[in-house]
Amino acid sequence: MSEGPDPGGCAAAPDDEVVHLPVAELVIEGSPRASGEDEEHVRSLVAVDQELPPIIVHRATMRVIDGAHRVRAARLSEKKRIRARFFDGSAEDAFVLAVQANVRHGLPLSLKDRISAAERIVATHPQWSDRMISTAAGISARTIAEIRRRSAESEPSGVRIGQDGRARPVDAARRRSLATALLTENPDLSLRQVAQVAGISPETVRAVRNRLLYGRRPAPARTLKPPRQEEDWAPNELDAVLRRLASDPAVRQTDTGRVLLRILRTQAMTAEEWQKTVDNVPLHCAQLVEQAARESARMWAEVAARMARNSSLAE
């Protein structure tokens, strides 16, 4: 019987001796499986004729470490006792053992559950190496390293509430880095899966994935700057913006992107060109042009506001 963490094998091992415990005395709580037991899996175990492997129970608390589905199946079958092995380590080591067991056999843990488990193990076993924790949690050492950095640098609340009432993560850059690691190691994951694990929106995950597709690094966290006035813009700055947009495959290779480029190019005139155009508007058309200009300005202001909101989500 082992009393603590095993440097070579992650968690302490349970006793070899198999005992028969009263099913009614067993406690099912604190599982690394956030969604709880799967009812269909429980029913499938009820239908099994052969004897199931013994469960693992934390002796100090009678909490089931491994085998919650088997216990549920035993209760459903109205069995009074179940085969079990005791574990005498700490509650923290018991959780590690539960994660290991659920990663290696039975109904596997979801990626979100494995990430959550890894975050907890990083907190309870900070002396363990990234590779040691990755072996226990069933995810890569690179992801563990990112979790460790994120947990060390994040603020207590982890989020800030904006003027629009929406909560946004403070450690946005670290969360995007975690999303990058997950997408690199598991390219088939959906946007929603990565978003749930990294704590960011699916649209932010989409932006991270697009940067990976085009060989770019994750976007750094923005620093807030005062809004620029019109006179701050250099004459050729809009041209530079248009060139950057036109060189982006996500813009130029889509129908909507090409339409956007055409619209922007028609308005990319210098101040002198605009002045010449305005000076040559017939006087009897001035009011109509004014109305059209004000309506266009209103629409562009709405576009700018929406782009600002989207930009903040991608951070």
Image (tube, rainbow, N blue to C red):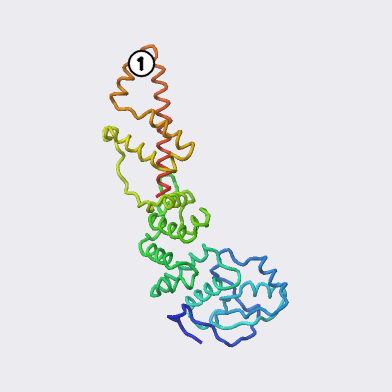
Against 91, residue 175 (above or below) is above
Viewer-nearest residue: 142 or 229: 142
Quarter-wise, where is residue 16 in the image?
bottom right
Against 241, residue 151 (above or below) is below
Q: Residue at x 52, y 65 (%)?
A: 113
Q: Residue at x 28, y 24 (%)?
A: 272
Residue 165 position within the rendered picture, expressed as x and y whole percent measured from the top left: 44, 47
Q: Residue at x 39, y 14 (%)?
A: 285
Quarter-wise, where is residue 87 in the image?
bottom right
Binning the other alpha carbons within 10 Å of mark 1 as few (below 14), some (14 to 19) or many (20 upward) gives few
Quarter-wise, where is residue 74 in the image?
bottom right
Report the side of 57 relative to 292 (left or right).
Answer: right
Residue 234 position within the rendered picture, expressed as x and y whole percent measured from the top left: 26, 34
Against 98, residue 266 (above or below) is above
How many dots with numbers?
A: 1
Residue 217 position within the rendered picture, expressed as x and y whole percent measured from the top left: 37, 53
Q: Residue at x 43, y 74 (%)?
A: 132
Q: Amino acid at mark 1?
A: Val
**Residue carrying label 1:** 281
Report the side of 172 relative to 110 (left or right).
Answer: left
Residue 240 position within the rendered picture, expressed as x and y whole percent measured from the top left: 32, 37
Q: Residue furthest top?
A: 284
Viewer-nearest residue: 257 or 96: 257
Against 284, residue 262 (above or below) is below
Viewer-nearest residue: 170 or 232: 232
Q: Which element type, helix, strand or loop, lies under badge 1?
A: loop
